[in-house]
Amino acid sequence: MQEYFSAEEIPAYHDKLLVVKMNQSAQSRIASFAISGTGEVAGASPGLSALAMYERGGMIKRVTPVSPRTSKRSTRGPRRAMASFAASFTEETAATPDFSYGVNVIEMEKDSHVSELQSVLAADPNVEFVSRVPIRYLQAARKKSASGRMTIQRSAPSLSQLWNLQKIKWQEARSLSGFKDADLIKVAILDTGIDKDHPDLKGLVSSYVSAHPDQNRPSGEKDIIGHGTHVAGTIAAKINNDIGINGICKCDLKIWKIFDDVADFYSWSYGFAYFVEPIMYYRALSDCIEQKVDVINLSIGGGGAPDHFERTLFETLISQGTTVVAAMGNERESGSPTSYPAAIPNVIAVGATKIDDKVASFSNRGNHISLCAPGAGIWSTLPTTPGQSGFKADRGPDGRPREGKPNKRETDYDAWDGTSMATPHVTAASALLLANRGKLSPAEVRTKLMASAFRVKSMKGKSFHPDYGAGRLDLLKLLS
């Protein structure tokens, strides 16, 4: 039995949150507010006055600068919001630009206050932008056995059963004359983390960011959910090491954990689930800009249109030459609603196909799809330690939901479904293309992926189909 998020049930935006960027011209005024004992400054703009008023009234729970350079300076509680805004103005230089300069996430005590504050800030000349924060979540299915319990699969199948690698002609591509692996290509995975000590992944991760000391919710190094470890295995598990599976390429693997370790209530039928933590996500994207990564894998999505900051980060990444690959989404049964970041312009959007090259029953369709890749029954690595994809919902004495039994996930290896599982195939293929064809722009990578894709039978000879894009990934043709 497969379970997927229902697009109708998930809100598009986080409750109580706003992301705000102040102009540099506001720095001195904000500093004055921060040191003012009364919270009043002569000649203050309406937006800053409103912030001070909300702060004095105890309506602002927390303000956190997005920049990782200011993370140790985050403050919380009454009359500390302005100090956090002041801390967000880092010392930016041309050599080390900070794309989070002046950006803060405001958490209100009540969601009813958010729209009013957003309107006032939007009209303030000191504010560059203010937006609601969209929700992003995983694009993998929750997989259950017929009994309703999560299955545990400790042993990977034989390599002959890895149909996904056979389908994209992985072995033939690697046997091409002059083939180069992607050792020098920086591949970033922004996900639930990774089990760095997994036998099929040990020694492959060049950097891993998981901790954020200024966050008020825990985020440890462990990949509790297992999703990031599964994605990483498809991309880069050790090849022909007589253990488990084979990854598609060998690359410079960089991991950012963008989920904290606390599950949030989703619905009574679904229970508690994990969602992307916005500040961790913003910081990871900013880091990818600063480190000039070559390819980013984003097996996440959500229906809320990107806020101004998220869109700016993607535009900057793509303009500097970073190829971004994202999952189309798993809400086909809900009418294939548009999911972001896959629908952001110039992002390579990936759908999922089955072993018979037909579109998977869950895979979203849409005119922004680039191509598809194997995404049903994909074997890959999972953490060797136990974990869970979420919790069932119990009703507490006060009638409110509380965590019940965990939805235990698999360990070591298992076959998962989702556009999350299709996306890393294209990410790895992009890395190999860059390794073998030299420097290419993201637009050129997308063009070559689509031009070389195999036109499956269901496309009926057309060069594009909203279920498949340009067709299913063909690694051999891509690299030939």
Image (tube, rainbow, N blue to C red):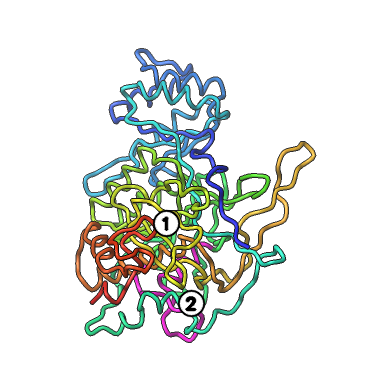
Determine whether label 2 and label 1 are within 8 Å by CB. Answer: no
The image position of residue 1, as x and y in percent, is: 63, 63
- What's the residue at 49%, 43% (across, down)? 135
Q: CA distance from mark 2 to mark 1?
A: 24 Å
Direction bottom: furthest residue: 242
Q: Is residue 252 visible?
A: no
Direction right: furthest residue: 397
- Check disc 2: other Cα within 10 Å, few if <14, some if 14-19, many if 20+: many
Q: Nearer the viewer, residue 160 or 81?
A: 160
The image position of residue 24, as x and y in percent, is: 29, 31
Identify whether 152 is placed above or below 48: below
Q: Nearer the viewer, residue 84 or 267?
A: 267
- Which residue has dot 1 on it? 327
Mark nearer the N terminus (2 vs 1): 2
Stretch in magenta: 227-253
- Check disc 1: other Cα within 10 Å, few if <14, some if 14-19, many if 20+: many
- What's the residue at 29%, 85% (across, down)? 175
Residue 69 horizontal side relative to residue 405, left or right: left
Magenta stretch: includes residue 251: yes
The mark closer to the camera, 2 or 1, is 1
